[in-house]
Image: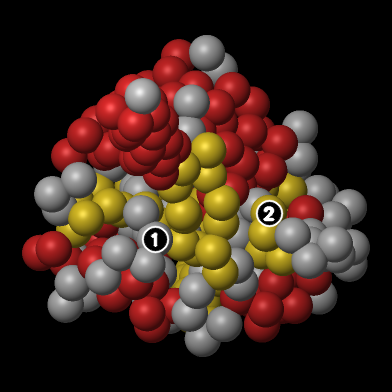
Amino acid sequence: MRKSVFVVITVVVLTVTIGAKISKKQRLTVGTVPDNPPMEMVDEGKQITGFDIDVMNLIAERQKFSISFLPVMKENIYRGLVDGTYDIVISSITLTAATSRPEFTELSFSDPYLEIGEVVVVSEDFGSYSGPESLEGKPVGVLKDGESAPLLEKEHGARVVVYDGIEAAFEDMARGAVDAVACPLPSASRMVHLNAEYRDIFRIEPKPLTGARYVIAAKKENTELLSRINSGISQIKENGSLQKLIEGRFFGR
């Protein structure tokens, strides 16, 4: 009798232990820095939201992950991934920027889920914009470290005006000092769609000037997880949900 009871207890313990491992494996903690609207931000209800959060939720839905988001400091974001504080990171990561971090060799990155760099923003009374060639001879604001300045100036004859910050560039466009501003898509969306002052007077042109590859990071050895994330990215591209999200979050459609 005691032996039978022992066997039953052992089976129960093993079942609970195995179940816990499976549950733990399926539940992921996602690190993010929620200070970059509309990519990652905290809403009025103190919830983390934004484009990246929506992307991760779509992937989790397709891949049957249970996820929770953990707000972290920008300077620690990769360190927490390496030491296992969280499983993955989605936080406006571009491959170009990630290569400069000391933790880069300990990480692996997903396929890109967004491949849009700098875009052009013009005022609603700009007229017909058919591409950067439309900016020939016109004053165009660019950021100090922006990638599109050589393209606009040398290839399309724009008169480039360099700014240290995006806010000053948009202020000048509002008062007519420049006819357009070239900046990263997330910055353009933040200034136009999340700013009541500019929402009705500026528009974002959808065709990008440059390309930036936004990716999700995981520990280098976590190849199975990264494979599933890549599968999820492929799925949300194919079913159109990612494109719908891009149009809604960035272009207000």
As shown in the figure, which amino acid type bears the numbered disc 1?
Tyr
Question: Is residue 115 among the parts visible in the rendering?
Answer: no
Q: Quadrant of residue 40?
A: bottom right
Give the residue at x 65% y 45%. Answer: 250
In the image, taking residue 49 as reference, residue 144 lies left or right, namely: left
Residue that mark 2 sits on: 49
Q: Position of residue 196 (x, y in %)?
A: 89, 63
Q: Position of residue 248 (x, y in %)?
A: 71, 36
In the image, taking residue 194 as reference, residue 128 lies left or right, namely: left
Instruction: Name the mark on residue 101.
Output: none
Task: Determine whether 161 is above or below 134 in the image.
Answer: below
Instruction: Name the mark on residue 86.
Output: 1
Q: Residues within 10 Å of mark 1 (few under 14, many from 20)?
A: many
Give the residue at x 75% y 78%. Answer: 171
Please identify the quadrant where the N terminus is shown: top left
Foreground: 157 or 91? 91
Foreground: 4 or 116? 4
Please identify the quadrant where the C terminus is shown: top right
Foreground: 204 or 123? 204
Task: Determine whether 1 is above or below 216 in the image.
Answer: above
Q: Position of residue 27 (x, y in %)?
A: 46, 42
Q: Secondary structure at mark 1?
A: loop
